[in-house]
Amino acid sequence: MLSVDGAERKLGQNDLIVSKTNLKGHITYANDVFLDIADYSLKQVLNQPHSMIRSEAMPRCVFQLLWEYLQDGREIFAYVVNATRKNDHYWVFAHVTPSTDANGKIISYHSNRRAPSEAAIEAVKALYEILLAEEAKHSNRKEGQKAGYALLLKILEEKGMSYDEFIFSL
Ligand SMILES: Cc1cc2nc3c(=O)[nH]c(=O)nc-3n(C[C@H](O)[C@H](O)[C@H](O)COP(=O)(O)O)c2cc1C
């Protein structure tokens, strides 16, 4: 099974984690639920890259897909495990969206997350373990990400589902 550092922290059923970023993915807003669970002050996260809470258990190819959707002007839903300041972890179901100006130009990004079901976490863990193993076969990070991405597409093709269909089947 996918191994994730530290102890698991759980979001409450009514909790919503919210953050916003600029075009580079640097944090411009984080709500109290974000700061509480990740164990940071607002000052510690503002202007930092969102990857500051990245967990090693997240396949790179999932973030590639996320950025492709966003830069294409599309919303994306994703299961993400994040690391806290003390290197514990928490799973979220994220809905990430681009914001545009009046001309349709993307100007920032916004993410809302809530607690995922246990069943979805187990299914995603199994998938992420496979993708991480593929990425780890390559000593070059970029090559690993590319291979993980290709494998993700292949797995979806075998399931006969788009990424969005797969996510909502969980
Ligand atoms: C609005 C928004 C929210 C994001 N939220 C997270 C998050 O909660 N955890 C995370 O690891 N990456 C998040 N990312 C993706 C990061 O920007 C980054 O791509 C990812 O952590 C991988 O980092 P790396 O490319 O430096 O390895 C978010 C990006 C955006 C635009």
Image (tube, rainbow, N blue to C red):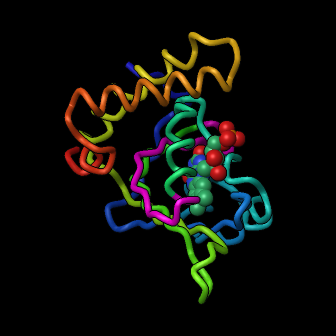
Q: Quadrant of the C terminus?
A: top left
Q: Is residue 166 left or right of residue 4?
A: left
Pick the front one: 15 or 27: 27
- Total labels: the figure holds 0
In the rendered image, residue 50, in percent from the top left (x then y), is placed at 67, 53
Residue at the extreme bottom of the image, as rendered: 102
Q: Is residue 84 visible?
A: no
Residue at the extreme front of the image, as rendered: 103
Q: Quadrant of the N terminus?
A: top left
In the rendered image, residue 139, in percent from the top left (x then y), is placed at 68, 12
Pick the front one: 15 or 79: 79
Residue at figure coordinates x 71%, y 70% from the top left: 28
Residue at figure coordinates x 43%, y 57% from the top left: 76
Task: Please report the bounds of the magenta region as a residue range.
Answer: 70-87
Pick the front one: 99 or 6: 99
In the rendered image, residue 110, in percent from the top left (x then y), is placed at 55, 69
Residue at figure coordinates x 63%, y 36% from the top left: 87
Residue at figure coordinates x 56%, y 75% from the top left: 99
Pick the front one: 2 or 6: 2
Q: Is residue 93 visible?
A: yes
